[in-house]
Image (cartoon, rainbow, N blue to C red):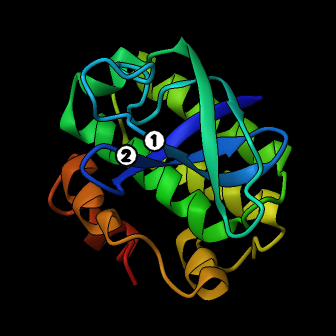
Amino acid sequence: MQATLIRLTRLTDTSLIAHWLTLDCGLIKTVAKGARRPKSPFAGKLDLFFSGEITFSRARRGELHPLKEVVIHHWREGLRKSYASTLLAAYCCQLLELAMEPDHPEPELHDLLDRALGHLEAAPPTMRALLHFENELVRILGVAHHQTSADRSLRETLGRLPGSRTELIDRLTPAADFRSSNGDLNS
């Protein structure tokens, strides 16, 4: 199944929890048993924003499914060229995690993330890219309001925005007076 790795957390000394955005299942969590061992079949295949094909078994109970195989098609090395690129890519993933239900496929949101990561791999991160992602997300979710900014609509709908947005705006704002001329983007 086609998937993009959006979060990776340590489970034990040798295992990891991999959070994926998949085309067919939406958000899923898998356990990569032994992934931290030197001779693991997952060695070098589990890193943020990697995408490709995964195989997993459905858990009988709970939401952690055993990961069986990973074949990476897109390594997305370009995202690691600058901290701002990595930060914006992570923000997009965090925002989608807030907006989506686990195990519920959302092909448009999968496509949105794929396009965003592809753009960030090829081009430098910009405020325009950040705002475009948020505008597309509110459009797809159906919560866009003509009189309200996308970030405000998202905050009202999701309850909050990822904390990394403040740092992103500081890093992506070309001039110190951007906020005063366009309104505070964090309000």
Image coords of residue 115 (percent x, y): 63, 30
| Image height of 69 relative to 181, above or below | above
In the rendered image, the residue lying farthest to the top is 73
Mark 2 Cα within 10 Å, few/some/many (few <14, many 20+)?
Answer: some
Looking at the rendered image, the quarter that the C terminus falls into is: bottom left
Residue 127 visible, this angle: no
| Residue pictured at 31% horizontal, 55% vertical | 12
Drawn side of residue 27 relative to residue 122, left or right: right
Name the one closer to the observer, 183 or 99.
Answer: 99
Q: Nearer the viewer, residue 31 or 8?
A: 31
Q: Residue at x 67, y 53 (%)?
A: 28
Identified at 75% across, 70% down, the residue is: 144
Extreme left residue here?
Answer: 176
Closest to the observer: 134 or 63? 63
- Look at the numbered disc 2 and give the secondary structure of its residue: loop
Observer able to see residue 157: yes
Taking 80 as reference, is 59 above or below it?
below
In this figure, which residue is indicated by the disc labeled 2?
15
> How would you rate the neighbour count of disc 1 (Cα within 10 Å): few for under 14, some for 14-19, many for 20 or more?
many
Instruction: Check disc 1 and report the residue beneath it.
Output: 33
Image quarter of the N terminus = top right
Location of residue 184 with respect to 119 vertically, above or below: below
Badge 1 amino acid: Lys
**Residue 125: quarter of image:** top left
| Residue at horizontal 79 percent and vertical 65 percent from the top | 141
Q: Secondary structure at mark 1?
A: loop
The three-letter amino acid code for the residue at tag 2 is Ser
- In this rendering, the answer to whether 58 lies above or below 162 is above
**Residue 56, position as x, y percentages in the image:** 70, 37
As measured in the structure, the alpha-carbon distance from the residue carrying label 2 to the one carrying label 1 is: 5 Å
Across and down, in percent, residue 32 comes to 48, 40
